[in-house]
Amino acid sequence: MTMLDDKLLRLGSSYRRVLLMALVVVAAMGLYRLILAPFSGQLLAAQRYESTLDSTIRKSKVLGTTLVAKKAKLNKLVATSDRLRNELFTPDEAREFFASLPAAVHMTGCVLQSVNHVPNQQANSQDREPDASGISDRKVVVTFIGGYNNIVRLLKGIQTYKRRVWIDSVNMDTGGVAGKLKCQTALTIYCIDRVETDLYE
C-alpha cells in the first residue's frame, strides 16, 4: 500500500510538474502575444519604412543630379536659340535690307546693274509640306560693276550686317570697262514669318 501511495504521489507530483510547465508555456505565449508581438510588428514596419526611405532618398539624389544636368543643357540650348534667333530677319527688316542694297552698292563706289529676287523653291513646290518652323529663306542675286577693292568692301559690309547674310556665290569677270570688274553675287537671308512679341527685345 505504501508503494502504491508512493507511486500515486510521484505520479501526482510529475503530473503537477507537467501541468505547471504547460501553464508556464501558455502564460509565456500569452505574454509574448500581449506584450512583445505588437512591438515586433512595429519593429518590422519601422525596418521596412527605413528601407523605403533610404531607397527614396537615393532616387531623389539621382533625380536631383539628372535635373541639374538637364537644366544646364536647357540653359545652353536657350542661349544657342537666342543667338541663332538674333541672326534672323523679321519681315520688315528683310524688306529694309533689300531696299538698302542699291544705296550700299553706291556707297562703296560700285554701280548697280540689277537686283533679282529668286523665287522660294519650297513655296513653289507642291510635293513638300509647309515648313512648321515659321522660318523661310529669301534669296536675291545682285549684279554690279566696280573696282576690286570696292567689291571687297561691299562684300565685307554685307557680311557684317546686323543680321546674318549668307553669301552663296560670287562670280567676277571683266566688265568691259578698264580697271572695273562685273560682279554677280547670290545672297540669302533667313526670315522668321511668325514674329514673337519678345523676339528682339
Image (spheres, rainbow, N blue to C red):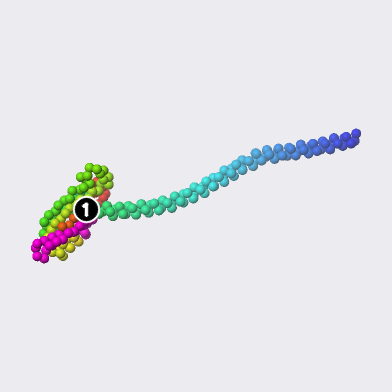
The residue located at (25%, 54%) in the rendering is 87
Figure disc tally: 1
Residue 155, image quadrant: bottom left
Q: Which region shows up in magenta?
A: 158-183
SS for callout 1: strand
Residue 82 horizontal/vertical position (percent): 29, 53
Residue 152 location (% of width, % of height): 17, 63
Front position in the image: 20 or 159: 159
Which residue was labeled with disc 1?
A: 189
Residue visible at 32% across and 52% down?
78
The quadrant of the picture occupied by the N terminus is top right
Q: Residue at x 28, y 54 (%)?
A: 84
**Displayed quadrant of residue 176:** bottom left
* Residue 164: percent from left, percent from top: 23, 56
Can you tell which quarter of the image residue 32 is in?
Answer: top right
Q: Position of residue 41 (x, y in %)?
A: 60, 42
Residue 121 seen in the current view: yes
Kind of residue indicated by mark 1? Ile
Q: Is residue 189 above or below residue 35?
A: below
Identify the residue at horizontal 26%, vertical 50% (top origin).
199
> In this view, which residue lies farthest toward the left?
177
Mark yes or no: residue 96 visible: no
Q: Say whether residue 152 is left or right of residue 17.
A: left
Decide whether residue 66 is among the magenta residues: no
Label 1: how many Cα within 10 Å (few below 14, some 14–19, many 20+)? many
Based on the picture, tell me whether residue 168 belongs to the magenta stretch.
yes
